[in-house]
Amino acid sequence: MSEPLIVVGNGMAAARLVEELSKRALGRYAIAVVGEEPRLAYNRVLLSALLAGEAELGDIELKPKHWWRDRGVTLRYGMRAIAIDPKAHSVTLADGKRLSFSRLVIATGSLPSKLPLPGMDLPGIFSFRDLEDVNTMARAKGARVVVIGGGLLGLEAAYGLARAGATVTVIHLMDRLMERQLDHAAALMLKHAVEARGIDVRLEAQTARVLGQRHVEGVELTDGSVIAADAVVVAVGVRPNAELARAAGLKVNRGIIVDDNLETNVPGIYAIGECAEHRGACYGLVEPGYEQAQVLARRLAGAKASYPGSVLATNLKVSGINVFSAGDFMGATEGADKIVLSDPGGGVYKKLVLAQDRLIGGVLFGDTADAPWYLELIRAGRAIGRLRDDLVFGRVLATQAAV
């Protein structure tokens, strides 16, 4: 008889877990996936393309309905899980039904961070996290929109809105865009590229309050300047969606605390993706969630596997702007060396960071074709050796020269 396995959350990490389990242990578990959104799992990375009109709804769907059915998965999407009882091994749904489990995986993702500022409760304030947000923002054609936050999510929202016909201003607190992923040189090139697409960028700009009586009318900055706006998108980060686990008595810090087995403090209950905290780190990116899903699927299938953590890598690709960063791209490691190739006129910038004859980080702007190879080298930790002299010129030239 199949062992009952419940996955709470119907996002990208949950879908990857089910996919990996279907490859490794099909039939071993009776899987039920519970998701609050009233739709099949979809690719959130493509929300900007959807908003920009460069993708259709069907393009972002991860798996069609028959895929889940063919693998014997019970889908309960459009249904919120409201309680977990670890002792009774059950999950209570919003409609009052209780589902029993032998194993439970929590993959509830993250929630958008909010700004505790005056006017943030006005109609016309949006986040950019799901399809409902996209559907609302798509009606902004011709509107004046302020995007608060110049990180990855904010820039994707700004691009999608601009392509949809809105007049967009990005305001960012820091001195450069995507400061967690880019150095100053790459960030400056990114700013120029974003502005060339008709988006106004204001750096070192702090929001004081949102103006308006019954609806958003503008944004006032701490320097007293005012930007007129019909809508405001807040993209200042995310926080793990861990309240369901906290209420169930699981250990929660910022996220749901898991060990190298992706298991919580309660045996048989696991957490993956943006809701999980591993060795003090909460990853707000897709790739670590996929890596966690793969490790957990192997363990649930009976194989030996552990999760050591992830090397962070970021990709931004909107309207021909290609950006990649990974690892220690700032060169904070003691004894680190930097190899830089810069061609601002050609729109290309590469910086590779090495330490002890190993590639430990890098930033690419414009030409990101070799990003997967660089990431592989960073993660593997192999000695660069004879590749070093031609490493910045890419995989083909570097490997040919090293022969």
Image: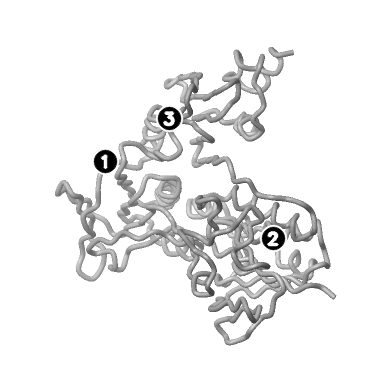
Task: Mark 1 or mark 3: name the one nearer the start of the chain.
Answer: 3
* Residue drawn where x is 60% and y is 24% of the image: 358
Tell me which amino acid carries mark 2: Lys
Residue visible at 48% across and 54% down? Answer: 51
Q: Residues within 10 Å of mark 3 (few under 14, many from 20)?
A: many
Question: Rounded to the nearest whole Å, what is the CA distance between mark 2 and mark 1?
Answer: 42 Å
Q: Residue furthest bottom?
A: 96
Discs 3/2, front: 3
CA gap, disc 3 to disc 2? 36 Å
Judging by the rendered image, the residue that carries numbered circle 3 is 186
> For numbered disc 1, what is the local secondary structure?
loop
Image spot of residue 226 (x, y percent)? 18, 51
Amino acid type, residue under disc 3 in the picture: Ala
Q: Disc 2 designates what residue?
A: 63
Query: Percent position (x, y) of residue 10?
Result: 61, 66
Is 130 located above or below residue 76 in the figure? above
Query: Whole-percent x and y of residue 352?
Result: 53, 24
Residue 366 seen: yes
- The type of residue carrying mark 1 is Glu
Residue at (58, 87) in percent of width and height? 96
Residue 376: image tag: none
383 versus 209 height, above or below: above
Name the residue beneath numbered marker 1. 204
Mark 2 vs 1, N-terminal side: 2
Secondary structure under the numbered disc 2 in the rendered image: loop
Question: Residue 95 falls in which quadrant of the image?
Answer: bottom right
Q: Position of residue 80 (x, y in %)?
A: 55, 76
For label 3, the SS is helix
Contact between labelled residues 1 and 2, with CB atoms less than 8 Å apart: no
Q: Residues within 10 Å of mark 2 (few under 14, many from 20)?
A: some
The residues bearing labels 1 and 3 have C-alpha atoms spaced at a distance of 17 Å
Relative to 386, 117 lies left or right: left
